[in-house]
Image (cartoon, rainbow, N blue to C red):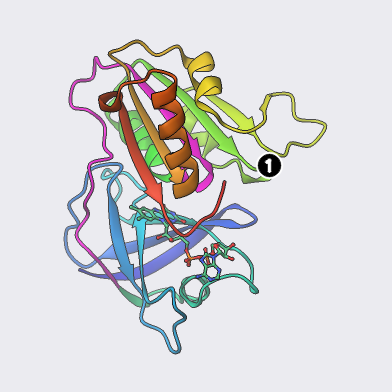
Amino acid sequence: MKAVFDHSNDEASNIKTFWFRPLGHLDYVAGQYTELYLPHDHPDRRGEKHWFTLSSAPCHELVSITTKYAGDDQSSTFKKTLLGLEPRAGVQLAEAMGDFVLPKDTAIPLVFVAGGIGITPFHAMLEWMASQSDHRNLKFIYSVRNENEIIFQDTFERAGIHATIVVGEPSDAWGGERGRLSAEMILGLTHPTPETLIYMSGPEPLVEALEKDMHAQGIAKQQLVSDFFPGYLGV
Ligand SMILES: Cc1cc2nc3c(=O)[nH]c(=O)nc-3n(C[C@H](O)[C@H](O)[C@H](O)COP(=O)(O)OP(=O)(O)OC[C@H]3O[C@@H](n4cnc5c(N)ncnc54)[C@H](O)[C@@H]3O)c2cc1C
C-alpha cells in the first residue's frame, strides 16, 4: 500500500519514531509488522526493504515504526534514506502480518520481556490496551544497554503498567536492576504460573538464547511467544 511520510520524533539520541499516512486503510492488530519499501540510489547489501513492527496502535490515524540509527559509519543505506525522508515523500508498506499479538482471552496472565528495540510491539500493545481500558495481569521486563536508551515510559504510565527496567551497562547513578537478561532473572522477577504466556521480543541472538534458557529452566514451549529482530547483534 502506498503511504506518505508525515513526521518523525526522537525517542532517544539514536532512536526515532517515523510516522506515515497510509493512502488507504492499513488493517492491523497491535504487535504486527509490515515491510517498508524505500527505493534509493546505490542500496547496500541490506537492500531497499526492511521489516518493521508497527509501533503505533490501530487507534491512531497515522502508523509508525520505531528504529535505531547506528551512526553514519555503520548504518545501512536504507536507514540513511529513512533518516533523510522529507515530509510527503512516498513509500510502500506491505499488508500487516504476524501473530505476536495479545491473546483474545484477557484473563490469561502475561509476562512481556523486551530487549532494546524489541520494545516496539509491546509499545503498540500497551497503547492499544490503554485506548481500550483493557487491564490485564501483566508483568513487564525491559532490558536496555544504558539508561539513555530507555524509551516509551509515558506509554507505560498511560497503560498503568510498571516496567522493571534492567540496564546492562548502567551509570553509577542507576538505582534499578542491572546486568544481563537471563531466564533465571526473568522468572525470579515475574514468578509465572503454568498458565502464563511469556512474550519475548528483541535482537535475534538475545531471544534465541532466552528461549533455550527458558526451556532449560522448565518453561514449556507453548508458554513462549517470541518475536525475533534480525539485523541487530545485541541489545
Ligand atoms: C518481524 C520483524 C520486526 C522487526 N521490527 C523492528 C522494529 O520495530 N524496529 C527495528 O529497528 N528493527 C526491526 N526489525 C529489524 C529490521 O528489519 C532491521 O533488520 C534492523 O532495523 C537493522 O537494520 P539495518 O540492517 O538497516 O541495520 P542498521 O540499523 O543500519 O545497523 C544495525 C547494526 O548492525 C550492524 N550490521 C548488521 N548487518 C550488517 C551488515 N550486513 N553490514 C554492516 N553492518 C551490519 C551495524 O554495524 C549496526 O551496528 C524487525 C525485523 C523483523 C523480521
For the magenta stretch, what is the residue range?
A: 92-119
- In this rendering, does residue 66 appear at all? yes
Side (left or right) of 168 relative to 106:
right
Question: How far across and how far down the image is residue 133, in percent?
Answer: 30, 24
219 or 156: which is nearer to us? 219
Side (left or right) of 113 relative to 12:
left
Side (left or right) of 25 relative to 229:
left
Question: How far across and how far down the image is residue 66, in percent?
Answer: 45, 54
Disc 1 packing (10 Å; few <14; some 14–19; many ≥20)? some
Q: Does the magenta-highlighted stretch encompass residue 41?
A: no
| Amino acid type assigned to the residue bearing label 1 in the image | Asn
- In this rendering, does residue 159 appear at all? no
Residue sitting at x 51%, y 56%: 232
| Residue holding disc 1 | 146
Residue sitting at x 53%, y 57%: 16
218 or 159: which is nearer to us? 218
Disc 1 secondary structure class: loop
